[in-house]
Structures are given as C-alpha cells and as structure tokens.
Image: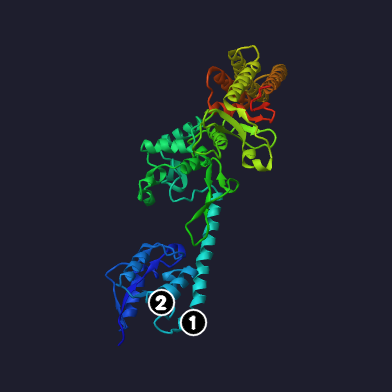
C-alpha cells in the first residue's frame, strides 16, 4: 500500500443554487463522503474540523470553510480534498480550473469529486471531461444569476422593497418585508442631515460633524462587520452623506437599482446613472418634504466639483462665464489674500486661448450682486410694503374659502329644493294637494332652482378667476423669501438658491443676474 492521504471532506450548500435542501444537505454530503472513504485503504478522513460552508454561493471562493481548509493545507495538516461532486467545490469555471490545474499540483494536493469520477492521483475517466463539466457548472450559476436579476427587477418595478435591510432612516415592515417603515431611532439624524445641507453645509462638513459627535454611521448602526475593522470604518464619510442626500426614498419615493454588480462572479458594485434608477412614487411615509429635498439637490449641484481646500464664498456655484458657458472659480492671491474670479475653462486651457480670464474682484462682485438683488426686490414689491402684498394674497385666499363655503351651501339648497318638488308630486298623486296647488308650488320651486343655479354658476366663474392654490402658495413663498432676504444683512446660500438661477459675467466685466422668481 502506498502513501495514505489525510483527507478533509468539503461540503457546501447554497439555496441560491436551487439545490435540493434535503438530498444535498451538509450532513448528507458528509455521510456520502464518509461511506466512500470507508471503502478505501489509501485515505484517512480527518473529520475533527468542520470545513463546511452552508449558505455560500459557488460563484467565488470567498467562503470561511474553504479559507480554513486552505490554511490547514498550507500547514501540512491536510493533503487530500473530497467533495460529493465538482459543483460542491465551486461553480466558477476560471477559479475551479486554477485550483485543479495549478494550485493543487503545486501544493501536492489530491482532489476527489466522487460523483464525477475525478481523482487527480489517477487517470480517472472523469478527468477527460472535466473542462466540459466546469463550463456547465459555470453556465448553471450564470443562468441562475440572470433569472434572479430578472425576478428582482420585476419586484422593484412593482414598488416592492428587495433589500435585506432598510436604507438608513427606514427599516423593513415586520408585517411585510417588501415595505419600508420609518426607523424612529434615527429619523432625527436624517432630518438634521437635510437641514444642515439646506443651510449650505456640504457632505464632508456634515460627515465630520456627525463623526465628532460620535453618531454611529449607517454601517455601525446596522451592525455590519466591515465597520468594526478599523477606527476609520466607524466614521461618517462624505460619499455616504452625499448618497443619502440624493436619495428620493426620503420623500416617500422608493428608489432602487442605484448600484449593480460588475459580474455574477464578483461582489464589486458600480453606480448606475440616475436616469436608470427604479423609482416608485408614494410607497411609504416620507421623512423629508419635497421642497427641502429639491432645495438640497440644487445646493449639491452648486457645490459640485469643488475641492476640500477652499475658501467658502456666498456665490459659489452661481458664477458662469458669459462667453464659454463654463463655471467661474474663485481664487485667493497668496500674498494679498485678495479673492478674484477666473474662468475655469480658460485656466485649464490657457495656452490654447479658448477663452479669456474674466478676472474680477470677487468681494466687490458679491457686494454688487447683493445690492442689485435687494434693489430689484424693493422695485419688485413696488412702493407698497411687503405686508400689503401678503395681506392682498391673504384676502384672495379668504375670498376663495368664502366662495367655496357659499357654493357648498347653494348645492345643499338645490338638493333640498329638488327633493321638495319630488315630495310635492307624491302629494299630488296621493291627493294630499290639488292639481292647482301643485302647479303653483312647483312653479315657485322651479324659479328658486333657476335662481340658485344662476348664483352657483356666477360663484364658480368667480372662483375660477382667482389664482389656483398652488400659484398662490408659490407667490406667498416668493414674497416670504424676498422679505427674508431684505431683513438679513448677510443672506444665506439657502436663500440665494431659491432666488437666483445663475450670475453671468462677460469678459468686459458686465454682470447679468438670472432670477428664478416671477409674480406677475
């Protein structure tokens, strides 16, 4: 008898593979391998260590049982691996070939796949067809992955939540795992995050605030193992905050398909373009109102592409070159500390003379823009006070409420009058009243219906002439913003983003402000 191998059984089970849970259970696989070894005299089964992987896909070898087995092989404890068949070891065609054809021979490891008649110590028949079997197993997991992706996409498009845990701020409904409910423990964190962003704070600043305050980041809060590997893993990062601030899930619109795996063989994910996200509206309770969310999106866009080492300034993201359309940056002179504007497109391509510098003193520009905006706001509200404008809009709103109440009263009177005519007719049929009485009374009721209907039509026309509720609310909000602007010595970026679209500067230093608001 030759050398006796020290063999380790390796069982694996993955329900995602579609395996029969009963016939392919970990216990059944080990018993099957033990029965095989009992009939051999060249193998000793080392079964005092559990190398099994229960619930792990065969698409990769990042499995705890397999990694433990490889360590024991390197230490010399094991020199033979036995599986029920090839698919139990794995289904990845490339990695399987790498192990069987290179790694195992280099480490002098014997591999046996019982049902596939493979034994690398001998020229067994199964070795002649191993490449075909590996390719088939790889195709099996690829096909299964494709089917699962289609099923999951269909669920997402139907507005069903498919994550294993809720997005930060939400959790899965215990009564329906495909629905989200608000996680009250961290609701206030989400609200505060958006309020800070609305005030003009960037994702990096917010992340640093939360980290310094010791607020658990989403990974730590969800008890994910990767968050405890290092101290930095416990900190908030700007990308996390930025991703959360851009997620429409917080306004009640379930947003999925933001990332996808690069391959069915890899866990690495890439970001999906926003236009390809799967968004289902009004699927759950919102944490953030839409107005706040939209304002934050505009501020994030204004702050886009800025560096971390910057001197913050009020008009950041609003300044554009009139000639080339690119953004204007703001630089600080090293010696004088004077801040000045410069065309970013020119700065990046100055040797090609694609544009001109557009150099301008930033601080004077900021004062000029604010003064012009204030003057325009004063001119906009004319000589009348802001209070008069609000009162005027309020009167319109009060009139609308009054008209609606009167219309409702008229409708009730019309119904009652028509009912009276019906009762009158029944009284005539039952000879409670005479035909003459019926004719006289019914004529009076009909005249009343005619007058009520005419009044109803007049009121409806008057009500329609008043601006819609949505327009009135927008007008009042604009006036509120203008008043707020005029009352502050130093307006905020939150306020500017609601009033200004952009500020264009020409090479002749002509400044043009594009406004958002219009009342008339």
Between residues 510 and 346, which one lies in front from this camera angle?
346
Q: Quadrant of the N terminus?
A: bottom left
The circle on residue 128 is: 1
- Left or right: 297 with respect to 61? right
How is the structure coloured here?
A: rainbow
Residue annotated with mark 2: 105
- Residue 326 versus residue 381: which sits nearer the camera? 326
Image location (x, y in percent) of residue 354: 69, 40
Is residue 185 in view?
no
Is residue 67 placed above or below 447 in the rendered structure?
A: below
Q: Residues within 10 Å of mark 2 (few under 14, many from 20)?
A: some
| Above-or-below relation of 249 to 107 | above
Residue 119, percent across and down?
A: 40, 80
Q: Which quarter of the picture shows residue 357?
A: top right
Q: Secondary structure at mark 1?
A: helix
How many numbered tags mark residues here?
2
* Mark 2 vs 1, N-terminal side: 2
| Label 1 Cα crowd, 10 Å radius (few <14 / some 14-19 / many 20+) | few
**How far, Cα to Cα, is label 2 from label 1?**
17 Å
User: Percent x, y for residue 55?
Assistant: 40, 62
Label of residue 254 in the image: none
Q: Position of residue 481 (x, y in %)?
A: 57, 22
Residue 413 vertical placement versus 21 (above, below): above
Circle nearer the viewer, 2 or 1: 2
Q: Secondary structure at mark 2?
A: helix
């Amino acid at each position: 008898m030759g050398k006796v191998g020290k063999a380790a059984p390796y069982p694996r089970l993955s329900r995602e593979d579609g395996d029969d849970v009963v016939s392919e259970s970990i216990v059944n696989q080990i018993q099957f391998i033990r029965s095989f070894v009992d009939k051999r005299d060249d193998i000793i089964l080392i079964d005092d260590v559990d190398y099994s992987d229960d619930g792990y896909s065969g698409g990769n070898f990042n499995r705890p049982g397999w990694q433990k087995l490889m360590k024991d092989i390197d230490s010399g404890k094991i020199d033979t691996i036995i599986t029920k068949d090839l698919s139990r070891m794995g289904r990845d065609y490339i990695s399987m070939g790498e192990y069987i054809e290179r790694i195992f021979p280099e480490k002098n490891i014997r591999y046996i796949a019982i049902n596939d008649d493979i034994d690398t110590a001998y020229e067994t028949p199964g070795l002649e067809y191993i490449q075909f079997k590996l390719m088939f197993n790889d195709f099996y997991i690829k096909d299964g992955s494709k089917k699962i992706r289609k099923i999951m996409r269909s669920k997402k498009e139907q507005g069903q939540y498919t994550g294993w845990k809720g997005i930060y701020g939400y959790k899965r409904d215990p009564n329906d795992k495909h629905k989200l409910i608000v996680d009250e423990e961290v609701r206030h964190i989400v609200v505060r995050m958006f309020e800070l962003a609305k005030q003009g704070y960037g994702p990096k600043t917010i992340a640093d605030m939360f980290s310094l305050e010791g607020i658990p980041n989403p990974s730590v809060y969800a008890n994910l193992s990767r968050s405890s590997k290092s101290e930095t893993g416990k900190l908030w990062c700007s990308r996390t905050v930025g991703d959360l601030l851009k997620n429409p899930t917080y306004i009640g619109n379930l947003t999925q398909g933001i990332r996808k795996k690069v391959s069915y063989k890899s866990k690495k994910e890439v970001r999906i373009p926003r236009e390809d996200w799967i968004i289902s509206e009004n699927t759950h309770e919102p944490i953030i109102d839409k107005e706040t969310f939209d304002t934050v999106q505009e501020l994030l866009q204004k702050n886009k592409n800025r560096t971390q080492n910057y001197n913050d300034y009020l008009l950041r993201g609003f300044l554009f070159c009139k000639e080339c359309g690119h953004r204007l940056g703001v630089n600080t002179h090293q010696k004088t500390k004077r801040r000045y504007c410069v065309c970013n497109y020119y700065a990046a391509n100055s040797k090609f003379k694609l544009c001109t510098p557009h150099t301008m003193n930033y601080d004077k520009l900021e004062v000029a823009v604010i003064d012009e905006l204030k003057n325009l706001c004063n001119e906009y509200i004319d000589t009348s006070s802001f209070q008069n404008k609000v009162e005027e809009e309020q009167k319109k709103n009060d009139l609308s409420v009054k008209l609606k109440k009167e219309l409702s009263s008229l409708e009730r009177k019309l119904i009652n009058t028509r009912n009276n005519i019906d009762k009158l007719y029944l009284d005539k049929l039952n000879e409670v009243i005479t035909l003459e009485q019926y004719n006289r009374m019914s004529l009076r009721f009909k005249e009343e219906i005619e007058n009520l209907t005419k009044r109803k039509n007049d009121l409806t026309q008057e009500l329609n002439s008043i601006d819609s509720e949505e327009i009135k609310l927008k007008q009042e909000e604009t006036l509120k913003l203008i008043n707020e602007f005029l009352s502050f010595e130093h307006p905020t970026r939150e306020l500017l983003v609601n009033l200004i679209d952009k500020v264009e500067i020409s090479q002749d230093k002509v400044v043009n402000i594009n406004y958002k608001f219009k009342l008339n």
